[in-house]
Amino acid sequence: MKKRILSLAAGAALASVLAVPASADVPITINGGIGQWYFDNDRNIDDTATPWVSLEYAFDDNWAAEIFYAEDETNTNGVDVDVSTWQLDMLYYGGSYIGGGNRVRPYLAFGGGEIDFEVDDTGVDSVETVLNAGAGIRYMLTPRFGARLEARLVHSLDESENDLLLSAGLNYYFGKVKEDTPPPPPAPVDSDGDGVTDDKDQCPGTPAGTRVDANGCPLPVERVASIKLKVNFDFDSSQVKEQYFNDIGELANFLKRFDDVDVQLEGHTDSVGPDDYNQKLSQRRADAVKDMLVNQYGISASRIKPVGYGESQPVATNDTKDGRAQNRRTMATLEVTYEE
């Protein structure tokens, strides 16, 4: 009769587990296997093998509760004895319990329950309250499927006898598992250190410190080019002296390099003479430098604007000979911002 009870219990346990939807991920493990009883000598009962089943419910990575049941038949003095036990235990696992974790997981077990000895054809049925403690190890073949070995000492509170149950079995875990994840892709490499990874760098090998765009190509560098021209004239003269020819040639080269830049030539005089005369003289001096740029260096006349300011913008005092010499001049200043 007890074997029928065991079959019904195992079937009910399995049905309850299989009834749980797979998507529910309930942390239940079903166990089953074969055990070996080593009974206390005082019982005078033959040691015997026994099938067993259990259900575990995991509370977290380490703690689980288990309902354990085992039943089989042995004999004493030629009389058959049905031996069954149920236990309600707590299991403490070393390593991660939920969803795979460690493949090898040792554990401790302790709890209590009953053991029942029913002698056939006699009506003798002894039910004892027991405590148990033991240890085992579980080896996970996959994140869900594994095997376990266990040794458990069962102590009878009623008879003060100690029985040993060794067991081996298989288990299947129905809860959520930690799926294997592929290794992270290698970190992108920036070989030239310009801040743009090699997979996006369209200009590899950029020198260190170079400012680059999103494609890793050098950004244009802004630079400034400038030039100043100052041509002094003799008193009451608009003739360009030979000593200034090279300076005017440098201005011409600048204008050729930056051919979209125009220039303004500013003519000036000292304060000697009437204002009207000095105005015309300053214009002739600006025109004289323009004529050299156009006729000798081929600069387009449309790019040059000569302007006479007369004596209105002195750069030195007109009270001295040297100061008046500095004021007799034609000047130009250019500054260009460009990209390289």
Image (cartoon, helix red, strand yellow):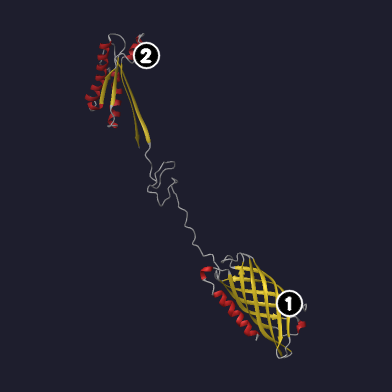
For marks 2 and 1, the one nearer the N-term is 1
Q: Is residue 120 left or right of residue 202?
A: right
Q: Is residue 56 visible?
A: yes
Q: Report the label total.
A: 2
What SS does tag 2 mark?
Answer: loop
Q: Is residue 271 left or right of residue 161?
A: left
**Mark 1: which amino acid?**
Thr
Q: Is residue 298 visible?
A: no
Q: Quadrant of residue 144?
A: bottom right
What SS does tag 1 mark?
Answer: strand
**Mark 2: which amino acid?**
Ala
Q: Residues within 10 Å of mark 1 (few under 14, many from 20)?
A: some
Give how far apart the Cα atoms at labels 2 and 1 are: 122 Å
Q: Nearer the viewer, residue 240 or 24?
A: 24
* Closer to viewer: mark 2 or mark 1: 1
Image quarter in which the N terminus is found:
bottom right
Q: Is residue 272 above or below residue 227?
A: above
Spot occupied by residue 128 in the image (x, y as percentages of width and height): 74, 79
Q: Is residue 169 left or right of residue 207?
A: right
Residue tagged by mark 2?
316
Spot occupied by residue 10 in the image (x, y as percentages of width and height): 60, 79
Residue tagged by mark 1?
129
